[in-house]
Protein backbone atom coordinates (compact mmCIF):
# COMPACT_ATOMS: atom_id res chain seq x y z
CA UNK A 1 0.00 0.00 0.00
CA UNK A 2 1.18 3.50 -0.80
CA UNK A 3 -0.20 5.86 1.81
CA UNK A 4 0.20 9.34 3.20
CA UNK A 5 -2.08 11.01 0.66
CA UNK A 6 -4.85 13.09 2.23
CA UNK A 7 -7.81 12.90 -0.15
CA UNK A 8 -10.54 14.44 2.03
CA UNK A 9 -8.87 17.29 3.88
CA UNK A 10 -8.41 15.46 7.19
CA UNK A 11 -5.04 15.03 8.86
CA UNK A 12 -5.77 11.31 9.24
CA UNK A 13 -8.48 10.40 6.69
CA UNK A 14 -7.95 6.65 7.15
CA UNK A 15 -9.37 6.75 10.70
CA UNK A 16 -12.93 7.17 9.43
CA UNK A 17 -13.28 3.39 9.14
CA UNK A 18 -11.10 2.36 12.08
CA UNK A 19 -13.96 1.90 14.48
CA UNK A 20 -16.04 -0.30 12.27
CA UNK A 21 -13.72 -3.18 11.39
CA UNK A 22 -11.73 -5.87 13.11
CA UNK A 23 -8.16 -6.06 14.23
CA UNK A 24 -6.78 -6.18 10.70
CA UNK A 25 -8.57 -2.99 9.75
CA UNK A 26 -7.48 -1.22 12.92
CA UNK A 27 -3.94 -2.49 12.37
CA UNK A 28 -3.98 -0.98 8.89
CA UNK A 29 -5.30 2.31 10.26
CA UNK A 30 -2.71 2.29 13.06
CA UNK A 31 0.17 1.78 10.64
CA UNK A 32 -1.23 4.42 8.30
CA UNK A 33 -1.43 6.91 11.16
CA UNK A 34 1.99 5.94 12.55
CA UNK A 35 3.76 6.33 9.20
CA UNK A 36 1.82 9.47 8.32
CA UNK A 37 2.87 11.09 11.60
CA UNK A 38 6.49 10.15 10.88
CA UNK A 39 6.18 11.74 7.43
CA UNK A 40 4.80 14.94 9.01
CA UNK A 41 7.60 15.02 11.61
CA UNK A 42 10.26 14.62 8.89
CA UNK A 43 8.74 17.44 6.84
CA UNK A 44 8.43 19.71 9.88
CA UNK A 45 12.02 19.01 10.93
CA UNK A 46 13.29 19.87 7.47
CA UNK A 47 11.20 23.04 7.57
CA UNK A 48 12.75 23.80 11.01
CA UNK A 49 9.40 24.21 12.75
CA UNK A 50 9.43 25.45 16.35
CA UNK A 51 9.10 23.03 19.29
CA UNK A 52 5.50 24.16 19.84
CA UNK A 53 4.53 22.69 16.46
CA UNK A 54 5.81 19.25 17.53
CA UNK A 55 4.14 19.49 20.96
CA UNK A 56 0.83 20.41 19.37
CA UNK A 57 1.12 17.65 16.79
CA UNK A 58 1.77 14.84 19.27
CA UNK A 59 -0.99 16.11 21.55
CA UNK A 60 -3.42 15.94 18.62
CA UNK A 61 -2.26 12.42 17.78
CA UNK A 62 -2.70 11.28 21.36
CA UNK A 63 -6.21 12.65 21.76
CA UNK A 64 -7.63 12.26 18.26
CA UNK A 65 -5.74 9.25 16.90
CA UNK A 66 -4.22 6.91 19.46
CA UNK A 67 -7.23 7.08 21.77
CA UNK A 68 -9.56 6.07 18.95
CA UNK A 69 -7.23 3.30 17.79
CA UNK A 70 -6.94 1.81 21.25
CA UNK A 71 -10.71 1.91 21.66
CA UNK A 72 -11.17 0.27 18.26
CA UNK A 73 -8.81 -2.63 19.06
CA UNK A 74 -11.09 -5.63 19.62
CA UNK A 75 -8.65 -8.40 20.53
CA UNK A 76 -5.07 -8.88 21.65
CA UNK A 77 -4.14 -11.84 19.49
CA UNK A 78 -2.57 -10.03 16.54
CA UNK A 79 0.23 -7.62 15.73
CA UNK A 80 -1.97 -4.68 16.66
CA UNK A 81 -0.89 -4.37 20.33
CA UNK A 82 2.78 -4.22 19.33
CA UNK A 83 2.08 -1.54 16.71
CA UNK A 84 0.04 0.57 19.13
CA UNK A 85 2.70 0.17 21.84
CA UNK A 86 5.44 1.26 19.41
CA UNK A 87 3.23 4.14 18.25
CA UNK A 88 2.66 5.27 21.86
CA UNK A 89 6.37 5.11 22.66
CA UNK A 90 7.41 6.96 19.53
CA UNK A 91 4.88 9.74 20.11
CA UNK A 92 6.33 10.06 23.62
CA UNK A 93 9.86 10.27 22.14
CA UNK A 94 8.79 13.10 19.84
CA UNK A 95 7.09 14.88 22.76
CA UNK A 96 10.27 14.59 24.86
CA UNK A 97 12.33 15.92 21.97
CA UNK A 98 9.99 18.92 21.70
CA UNK A 99 10.23 19.57 25.44
CA UNK A 100 14.02 19.43 25.22
CA UNK A 101 14.10 21.94 22.36
CA UNK A 102 15.74 19.39 20.08
CA UNK A 103 17.22 20.26 16.70
CA UNK A 104 15.83 19.29 13.30
CA UNK A 105 18.55 16.62 13.07
CA UNK A 106 17.27 15.02 16.29
CA UNK A 107 13.74 14.68 14.88
CA UNK A 108 15.09 13.23 11.63
CA UNK A 109 17.13 10.73 13.64
CA UNK A 110 13.97 9.65 15.48
CA UNK A 111 12.31 9.16 12.09
CA UNK A 112 15.21 7.03 10.87
CA UNK A 113 15.22 4.94 14.05
CA UNK A 114 11.54 4.08 13.81
CA UNK A 115 11.97 3.05 10.16
CA UNK A 116 15.20 1.11 10.62
CA UNK A 117 14.91 -0.39 14.11
CA UNK A 118 11.44 -0.12 15.67
CA UNK A 119 9.06 -1.15 12.91
CA UNK A 120 11.22 -3.99 11.47
CA UNK A 121 11.37 -5.45 14.97
CA UNK A 122 7.60 -5.95 14.93
CA UNK A 123 7.46 -7.10 11.32
CA UNK A 124 6.72 -3.88 9.45
CA UNK A 125 8.76 -2.78 6.45
CA UNK A 126 8.64 0.98 5.84
CA UNK A 127 10.08 2.59 2.72
CA UNK A 128 10.32 6.30 2.01
CA UNK A 129 9.05 7.28 -1.42
CA UNK A 130 9.17 10.60 -3.32
CA UNK A 131 5.38 10.80 -3.09
CA UNK A 132 4.97 9.58 0.48
CA UNK A 133 5.74 6.19 1.97
CA UNK A 134 5.08 2.50 1.55
CA UNK A 135 4.57 0.04 4.41
CA UNK A 136 3.90 -3.66 4.36
CA UNK A 137 4.04 -6.57 6.78
CA UNK A 138 7.03 -8.89 6.59
CA UNK A 139 8.88 -11.55 8.55
CA UNK A 140 10.82 -9.86 11.40
CA UNK A 141 13.69 -12.33 10.90
CA UNK A 142 13.95 -11.40 7.23
CA UNK A 143 13.91 -7.71 8.12
CA UNK A 144 16.56 -8.28 10.81
CA UNK A 145 18.84 -10.03 8.32
CA UNK A 146 18.39 -7.25 5.79
CA UNK A 147 19.12 -4.66 8.47
CA UNK A 148 22.28 -6.49 9.50
CA UNK A 149 23.44 -6.66 5.89
CA UNK A 150 22.88 -2.93 5.49
CA UNK A 151 24.82 -2.23 8.67
CA UNK A 152 27.71 -4.38 7.46
CA UNK A 153 27.70 -2.64 4.07
CA UNK A 154 27.54 0.77 5.74
CA UNK A 155 30.44 -0.16 8.02
CA UNK A 156 32.50 -1.35 5.07
CA UNK A 157 31.72 1.85 3.17
CA UNK A 158 32.67 3.95 6.19
CA UNK A 159 35.89 1.97 6.63
CA UNK A 160 36.79 2.52 2.98
CA UNK A 161 36.04 6.22 3.34
CA UNK A 162 38.36 6.48 6.36
CA UNK A 163 41.08 4.48 4.58
CA UNK A 164 40.93 6.83 1.59
CA UNK A 165 41.02 9.87 3.84
CA UNK A 166 43.97 8.44 5.77
CA UNK A 167 45.91 7.80 2.59
CA UNK A 168 45.19 11.35 1.41
CA UNK A 169 46.33 12.95 4.66
CA UNK A 170 49.48 10.80 4.80
CA UNK A 171 50.41 11.99 1.32
CA UNK A 172 49.75 15.56 2.36
CA UNK A 173 52.00 15.13 5.39
CA UNK A 174 54.74 13.67 3.23
CA UNK A 175 54.45 16.53 0.76
CA UNK A 176 54.46 19.29 3.38
CA UNK A 177 57.24 17.63 5.37
CA UNK A 178 59.46 17.98 2.28
CA UNK A 179 58.35 21.59 1.85
CA UNK A 180 59.18 22.31 5.49
CA UNK A 181 62.88 22.18 4.62
CA UNK A 182 64.04 25.62 3.44
CA UNK A 183 65.58 25.95 0.00
CA UNK A 184 68.97 26.81 1.45
CA UNK A 185 69.05 23.52 3.38
CA UNK A 186 67.52 21.13 0.86
CA UNK A 187 70.75 20.12 -0.93
CA UNK A 188 73.11 19.90 2.03
CA UNK A 189 72.10 16.39 3.18
CA UNK A 190 72.86 15.08 -0.34
CA UNK A 191 76.57 14.43 0.30
CA UNK A 192 76.54 11.58 -2.23
CA UNK A 193 75.73 14.15 -4.94
CA UNK A 194 77.22 17.50 -3.94
CA UNK A 195 80.30 18.65 -2.04
CA UNK A 196 80.30 22.44 -2.28
CA UNK A 197 77.56 25.11 -2.16
CA UNK A 198 77.28 28.85 -2.73
CA UNK A 199 76.08 31.36 -0.14
CA UNK A 200 72.44 30.53 -0.88
CA UNK A 201 72.97 26.81 -0.42
CA UNK A 202 72.82 25.96 -4.12
CA UNK A 203 75.29 23.20 -5.11
CA UNK A 204 78.37 24.25 -7.10
CA UNK A 205 80.39 21.01 -7.17
CA UNK A 206 79.60 17.32 -7.43
CA UNK A 207 80.49 14.80 -4.75
CA UNK A 208 83.68 14.04 -6.74
CA UNK A 209 84.70 17.70 -6.48
CA UNK A 210 83.94 18.61 -10.07
CA UNK A 211 82.22 21.91 -10.82
CA UNK A 212 78.61 21.50 -11.95
CA UNK A 213 78.02 21.90 -15.66
CA UNK A 214 75.84 24.74 -16.92
CA UNK A 215 72.96 22.33 -17.43
CA UNK A 216 73.39 20.84 -13.95
CA UNK A 217 73.55 24.31 -12.44
CA UNK A 218 70.32 25.31 -14.21
CA UNK A 219 68.65 22.17 -12.88
CA UNK A 220 69.54 22.77 -9.23
CA UNK A 221 68.64 26.46 -9.50
CA UNK A 222 65.21 25.49 -10.84
CA UNK A 223 64.72 23.07 -7.94
CA UNK A 224 65.92 25.75 -5.52
CA UNK A 225 63.38 28.33 -6.77
CA UNK A 226 60.55 25.79 -6.63
CA UNK A 227 61.44 24.93 -3.05
CA UNK A 228 61.52 28.60 -2.13
CA UNK A 229 57.94 28.93 -3.37
CA UNK A 230 56.80 25.69 -1.72
CA UNK A 231 58.44 26.59 1.58
CA UNK A 232 56.72 29.98 1.54
CA UNK A 233 53.35 28.20 1.09
CA UNK A 234 54.25 25.87 3.95
CA UNK A 235 54.86 28.85 6.22
CA UNK A 236 51.58 30.40 5.10
CA UNK A 237 49.80 27.19 6.11
CA UNK A 238 51.15 27.54 9.64
CA UNK A 239 54.56 25.96 9.48
CA UNK A 240 55.38 23.35 12.11
CA UNK A 241 51.98 23.69 13.80
CA UNK A 242 50.39 22.80 10.47
CA UNK A 243 52.48 19.62 10.31
CA UNK A 244 51.51 18.81 13.90
CA UNK A 245 47.85 19.16 12.93
CA UNK A 246 48.32 16.72 10.04
CA UNK A 247 49.99 14.22 12.36
CA UNK A 248 47.15 14.54 14.86
CA UNK A 249 44.61 14.04 12.08
CA UNK A 250 46.43 10.87 10.99
CA UNK A 251 46.41 9.56 14.56
CA UNK A 252 42.66 10.24 14.78
CA UNK A 253 41.94 8.48 11.51
CA UNK A 254 44.10 5.51 12.49
CA UNK A 255 42.18 5.18 15.75
CA UNK A 256 38.88 5.46 13.88
CA UNK A 257 40.03 2.78 11.46
CA UNK A 258 40.97 0.46 14.33
CA UNK A 259 37.53 0.88 15.88
CA UNK A 260 35.85 0.11 12.55
CA UNK A 261 37.99 -3.01 12.12
CA UNK A 262 37.00 -4.61 15.43
Image (tube, rainbow, N blue to C red):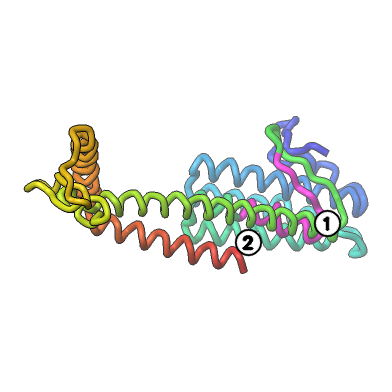
Which of 93/105 is in front?
A: 105
User: Residue 123, can we see it?
Assistant: yes
Q: Position of residue 120 (x, y in %)?
A: 77, 56
Q: Quadrant of the N terminus?
A: top right
Q: According to the image, label 2 marks what residue?
A: 92
Is residue 86 on the magenta stretch? no
Q: Dot 2: within a 10 Å radius of its alpha carbon, few (fewer than 14), some, or many (20 or more) residues?
A: some
Q: Nearer the viewer, mark 1 or mark 2?
A: 1
Q: Position of residue 34 (x, y in %)?
A: 73, 50
SS assignment at label 2 = helix
Which of 212/130 is in front?
A: 212
- Outermost residue, bottom direction? 262
Mark 1 vs 2: CB contact within 8 A: no
Q: Position of residue 96 (x, y in %)?
A: 56, 62
Residue extent of the magenta highlight: 110-128
Is 34 situated left or right of 43 in this image?
Answer: right
- Picture residue at 77% right of the left edge, 38% below the top: 3
- Picture residue at 19% right of the left edge, 54% below the top: 188
- Outermost residue, top direction? 7
Q: Quadrant of the C terminus?
A: bottom right
Which of 80/125 is in front?
A: 125
Q: Dot 1: within a 10 Å radius of its alpha carbon, few (fewer than 14), some, or many (20 or more) residues?
A: many
What number is the disc on residue 29? none
- Picture residue at 75% right of the left edge, 30% below the top: 7
Mark 1–mark 2 Cα distance, whole angstroms, equals 21 Å
User: Residue 83, can we see it?
Assistant: no
Q: According to the image, label 1 marks what residue?
A: 123
- Picture residue at 15% right of the left edge, 49% below the top: 184
Which of 115/224 is in front?
A: 224
Is residue 116 on the magenta stretch? yes
Amino acid sequence: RILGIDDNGSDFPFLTSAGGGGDEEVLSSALDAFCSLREDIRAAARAKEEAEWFRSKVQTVRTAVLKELHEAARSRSSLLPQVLSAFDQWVESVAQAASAGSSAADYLELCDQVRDDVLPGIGVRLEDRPDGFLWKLDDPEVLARERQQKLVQAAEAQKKKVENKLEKVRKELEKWSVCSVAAGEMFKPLADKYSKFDDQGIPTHTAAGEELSKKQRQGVEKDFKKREADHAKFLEQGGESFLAGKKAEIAQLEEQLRSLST
